[in-house]
Amino acid sequence: MQATYDAITSLTDPFCREHLNEEYAELAQRMTAALCRKRPSPLASGQPRTWACAIVYTLGQLNFLSDKSSQPYMVMADLCAAFGVGQSTASAKAKVIRSALHANRMDPTWMLQSFVNQNPLVWMAEVNGILVDLRDMPREVQQIAFEKGMIPYIPADREKDPEQYSS
């Protein structure tokens, strides 16, 4: 699958860097790798440009790329045209990707860091029967939540070294 990964990311990397941003490029690399590890991998058949388009399309859907109020912004039809892939094909492959990875808009795994920081649902947890925002909890509680994979990073650490977490 290494050749497939290389073929797809050789298309997604320059597209994301030219039209979107570095964060999209990194997410596309991670998503491609995750799909390559699936058994059987949906990437085993089909054209790399179709999968490259579908991966960026999926990330765009999950991160509101076609919402004019978001940055970066791009119409999905323009994204598909840049890859030379029909929008219905990209949409169908995106559905395969979302299904294979159990991806949805609330999953911080596939969110742009700026959305993770702003999404209160990422930080909510039930503690002793009460819904709390883990960003407001003591560092010890944040550490436990991070170790259990409940949150993407420890907010108390971010406050100490914001440069490490800037996007």
Image (spheres, grey):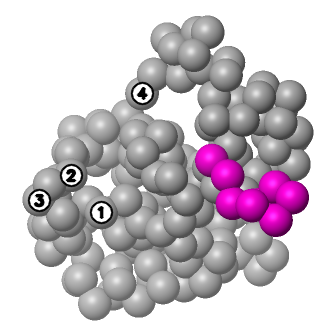
For the stretch drawn in magenta, the main secondary structure is strand
Question: In the rendered view, does 121 fall on the left or right side of 101?
Answer: left
157 is within the stretch colored magenta: no
Q: Secondary structure at mark 2?
A: loop
Few, some or many residues within 10 Å of mark 3 (<14, 14–19, 20+): few
In this picture, is 157 found above or below 144?
above
Q: Quadrant of the N terminus?
A: bottom right
From mark 4 to mark 3, how far is it between C-alphas? 20 Å
Which residue bears the numbered disc 1?
Answer: 64
Q: Are marks 2 and 3 in contact (CB under 8 Å)?
A: yes
Q: Is residue 49 left or right of residue 136?
A: left
Question: Which label's residue is closer to the chain start, 2 or 4?
Answer: 2
Evaluate if marks 2 and 1 touch, with contact meaning CB atoms under 8 Å apart: yes
**Between marks 2 and 1, how big is the CA–CA gap?**
7 Å
User: At which x and y percent is residue 21?
Assistant: 30, 38
Residue at 48% from the left image edge and 68% from the top image edge: 105
For disc 3, the marked residue is 68
Distance (Cα) linking label 2 and label 4: 15 Å
For badge 1, the amino acid type reads Phe
Q: Does residue 80 appear left or right of residue 104 in this picture?
A: left
Q: What residue did someone put label 4 on? A: 167
Residue annotated with mark 2: 70
Mark 4 and mark 1: Cα distance apart in space: 17 Å
* Within-10-Å neighbours for mark 2: few <14, some 14–19, many 20+: few
Task: Specify which label sits upstream in the sequence, 4 or 3.
Answer: 3
